[in-house]
Image (cartoon, rainbow, N blue to C red):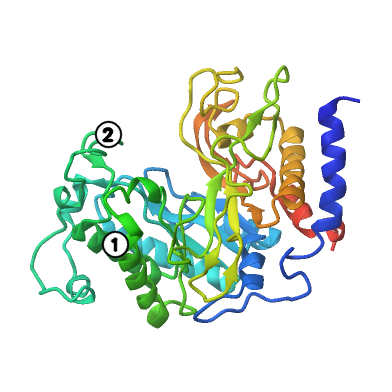
């Protein structure tokens, strides 16, 4: 029997044993209630039902979903409780107000279907010259104790003074420096508007490239403290869950983030094209490396719970080939997954879920349900969607039933 088949049999047993409970950290408890803070058990429960569904509410850079009704149906049917990357911009849209209005309207539709769902917005590691046309509301200045001015945000004032990170993403699109007050004003503005739109989680992207001038994370702590203070008064359940792509940032024994997130970092199986495994000690992976400390909700842990997701970052142009470096058989992680045949996708999700359950007790697989593809699949499909294929979602990949079955374990038929 091929080694790959044996691998899947082993992890299938693990899935059967572990998937029946809603959380490895608190399987005996039920419910998703929180208000003002969140317990370890409830946080684990949410992360154990997490998906990446990019643009569910709205996005710019990637197209927003064209099948919101079917997305809500699917997410409800599979039991998703944490929807990652539901709202974001990469390149700033021409009308930022319309973006936030669309986010709020779509968030209401999701919460009408399931009020427990946590929707995550993103404030990424990018600022563009477009910020120069966004007026600064009086409430931003007031939140920082500054005199109110009649002006717009200033792109140049957000950048590293030594020039590094400038134009990293393209001309006029740079890495922001969190030690700059203007950067904190901008991040606070975006986070607060997402909270007002109904989002209860904010992903802050690659924190490590925005803190080069912030020893001790003094300025990150300032920003996060202001965002959390606003959420405590105005968020749906008086809490915003903050995370970033990091193994952990800790100051004085206190964790900056409520949970961590990181890409899968897949390992190619030599001689078996398109086959991959997960492993500890893969370059840059988070398994066994999530920092511990005192969380923003006040409880302590040796290792903070974290999500691992199939990342998107580009295409080498050599799909199906061993290229090395960051590439997974020539693709980024989500494009690799989308280019598998249907049976292999299902097998891999079962394998990954079982492997993480058995080898990473603080980790949770963030199920892929919607993500842009840098390498289109056959027929030119540029968006992976887990939805069952139907008139409502004609390019669905049909993975939703597998996700539902994995999460429900032996009770998948109920």
Kindly identify the residue that appears in the image at 61 percent across and 68 percent down.
Answer: 43
Task: Read off the residue under disc 2.
Answer: 170
**Residue at 71% of width from left, 37% of height from top?**
345
| Marks 1/2: CA–CA distance | 26 Å
Foreground of the two, 302 or 129: 302
Question: Residue 139: which quarter of the image?
Answer: bottom left
Mark 1 surroundings: few (<14), some (14-19) or many (≥20) residues within 10 A:
many
**Quadrant assignment, res 91:** top left
Whether residue 148 can be seen here: yes
Can you tell which of label 1 and label 2 is closer to the viewer? 1
What residue is rendered at 65% in x and 63% in y? 76
For mark 1, what is the residue? Answer: 219
Q: Say which element carries label 1.
A: helix
Q: Horizontal and vertical percent for residue 120?
A: 48, 61
Q: Is residue 68 visible?
A: no
Classify 63 as above or below 135.
above
């Amino acid at each position: 029997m091929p080694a790959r088949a044996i691998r899947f049999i082993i992890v299938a047993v693990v899935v059967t044993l572990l998937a029946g409970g809603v959380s490895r950290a608190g399987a005996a408890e039920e419910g998703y209630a929180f208000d003002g803070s969140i317990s370890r058990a409830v946080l684990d429960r949410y992360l154990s039902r997490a998906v990446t569904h990019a643009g569910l509410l709205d996005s710019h850079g990637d197209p927003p979903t064209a099948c919101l009704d079917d997305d809500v149906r699917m997410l409800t049917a599979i039991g998703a409780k944490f929807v990652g990357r539901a709202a974001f911009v990469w390149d700033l849209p021409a009308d930022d107000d319309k973006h936030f209005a669309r986010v709020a309207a779509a968030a209401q539709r999701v919460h009408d279907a399931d009020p427990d769902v946590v929707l995550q917005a993103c404030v990424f590691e990018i600022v563009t010259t477009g910020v120069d046309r966004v007026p600064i509301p009086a409430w931003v200045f007031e939140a920082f104790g500054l005199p109110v001015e009649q002006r717009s945000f200033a792109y140049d004032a957000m950048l590293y003074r030594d020039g590094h990170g400038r134009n990293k993403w393209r001309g006029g699109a740079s890495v922001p420096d969190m030690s700059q007050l203007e950067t904190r004003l901008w991040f606070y503005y975006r986070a607060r508007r997402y909270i007002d739109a109904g989002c209860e989680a904010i992903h802050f992207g690659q924190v490590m490239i925005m803190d080069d001038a912030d020893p001790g994370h003094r300025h990150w702590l300032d920003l996060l403290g202001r965002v959390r203070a606003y959420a405590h008064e105005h968020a749906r359940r008086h809490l915003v869950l903050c995370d970033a792509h990091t193994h952990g940032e800790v100051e004085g024994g206190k964790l900056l983030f409520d949970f961590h997130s990181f890409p899968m970092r897949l390992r190619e199986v030599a001689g078996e094209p398109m086959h991959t495994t997960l492993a500890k000690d893969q370059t840059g992976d988070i398994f066994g490396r999530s920092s511990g400390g005192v969380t923003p909700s006040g409880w302590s842990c040796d290792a903070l719970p974290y999500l691992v997701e199939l990342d998107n970052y580009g295409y080498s142009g050599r799909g199906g080939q061993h290229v090395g470096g960051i590439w997974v058989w020539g693709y980024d992680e989500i494009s690799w997954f989308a280019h598998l045949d249907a049976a292999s996708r299902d097998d891999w999700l079962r394998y990954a879920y079982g492997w993480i359950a058995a080898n990473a007790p603080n980790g949770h697989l963030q199920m892929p349900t919607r993500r842009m593809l840098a390498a289109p699949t056959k027929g030119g499909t540029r968006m992976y969607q887990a939805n069952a294929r139907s008139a409502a979602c004609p390019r669905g990949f049909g993975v939703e039933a597998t996700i539902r079955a994995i999460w429900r374990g032996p009770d998948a038929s109920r």
